Image (cartoon, rainbow, N blue to C red):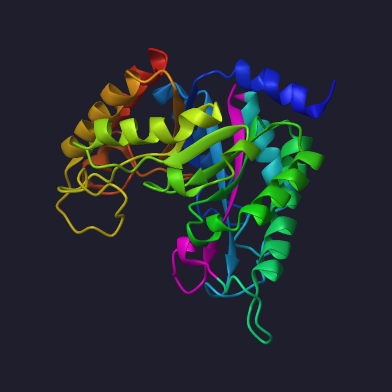
Amino acid sequence: MEMGTINDERVSGLDTIKGFTYGWLSGRGKLLTEKAKISLRLMKERTYSTHVVIALAALQDTAQSTKIDFTGNHLPSDDELIEWISYAQSLGLRVIMKPTVNVRDGTWRAHINFFDIDVPCEPKWGDWFASYTDYQLHYARIAEKTSCDMHIVGCEMVQAERREQDWRRLISSIKQVYNGLVSYNTDKYQEGNVRWWDAVDIISSSGYYPIHDWERQLNRIEKIIKPFKKPFFFAEAGCPSRSGSSLIPNDWSHQGQINIEEQSEFYQEMFKKTHKRSWVKGFGLWDWRTELYQEDDAHLDDGYDVFGKPAEKVIAEFYQAGGK
């Protein structure tokens, strides 16, 4: 049976993705601690998650650097990652591999960019994609070895998305070494910016939309993805527990008073609106940390975390009911 046929069958039988993103910025030695294992187990038990997105962050020095470092202590070792995937699967979780890239100087990855026409002595897209392909293939091979359910080939690479042929070559290379489903996670509002959705098996984006704007955004996204006839899910979605964050849920730096009720209201509204859309196949919510705070201190946390907060119960009820 050809690889494409296998993926066609998996796509047609795709279960709802009831997931959380896990492991963000967890460097070497962090995934297999007892606290990390307890955290993952609690994520599954308390939220009724069926999927976990393991988010990895390689590093490049600046937004115009062409060398991507995926061998340092900022990432788990291969052996550590493989053992962690085995542990997650032993809990009954389906694993989604998501290798991303960050910039050491703090620039958001969406601004990684180069000239479209090569200029001597200037950094080039070709060199960056060569390094990025090596990075993605390394983890795609691990995803294949460990039977991960999906590989997400990038996240919120807004400026890079116009490089259609480079992405097509990358995805083709990944499908030579990985038999599972392949997706790409575009950023909020950018669903129409990707012209190569036909190359992936599943379309995904970051669902950080203002609490009162979900209906309009879902209408917009549906029109964009419909011609591609591909399933869709929100590979990221969430909201900090701060006053005002439900209006700008993507802004992790927003200053506001701790407000765990507003976070809960955001999740209620998001699920209420997406529940009506059969084409939304799930979530990889942002995010669940490897080392949890004390549950009694949940009311003191203003981040995206939901552990011990009202939002956790909203998610658990939604996922337990089927996540649709």
Tell me which residue sits at (49%, 61%) in the image: 159
Where, by quadrant of the figure, is residue 60 drawn? bottom right
- Which residue is farthest right? 1
- The residue lying toward the viewer, choosing from 12 and 135, is 12
- Which residue is farthest bottom? 121
Tell me which residue sits at (58%, 19%) in the image: 14
Where are the magenta residues, as a range?
Answer: 91-113
Residue 206 at x, y percent in the picture = 42, 43
- Which residue is farthest top? 321
The C terminus sits in image quarter = top left
Asked whether residue 41 is in view, the answer is: no
Residue 78 at x, y percent in the picture = 73, 50
Where, by quadrant of the figure, is residue 129 drawn? bottom right
Asked whether residue 223 is in view, the answer is: yes
Tell me which residue sits at (61%, 53%) in the image: 164
Q: Is residue 79 magenta?
A: no
- The residue lying toward the viewer, choosing from 317 and 136, is 136
Say if 147 sits above or below 294 in the image.
above
Tell whether 139 sits left or right of 1: left
- The residue lying toward the viewer, choosing from 77 and 202, is 202
Say if 244 sits above or below 315 in the image.
below
Q: Is residue 98 magenta?
A: yes
Say if 216 sits above or below 70 in the image.
above
Residue 264 at x, y percent in the picture = 23, 32
Residue 259 at x, y percent in the picture = 16, 43
- The residue lying toward the viewer, choosing from 67 and 241, is 67
Where, by quadrant of the figure, is residue 208 drawn? top left
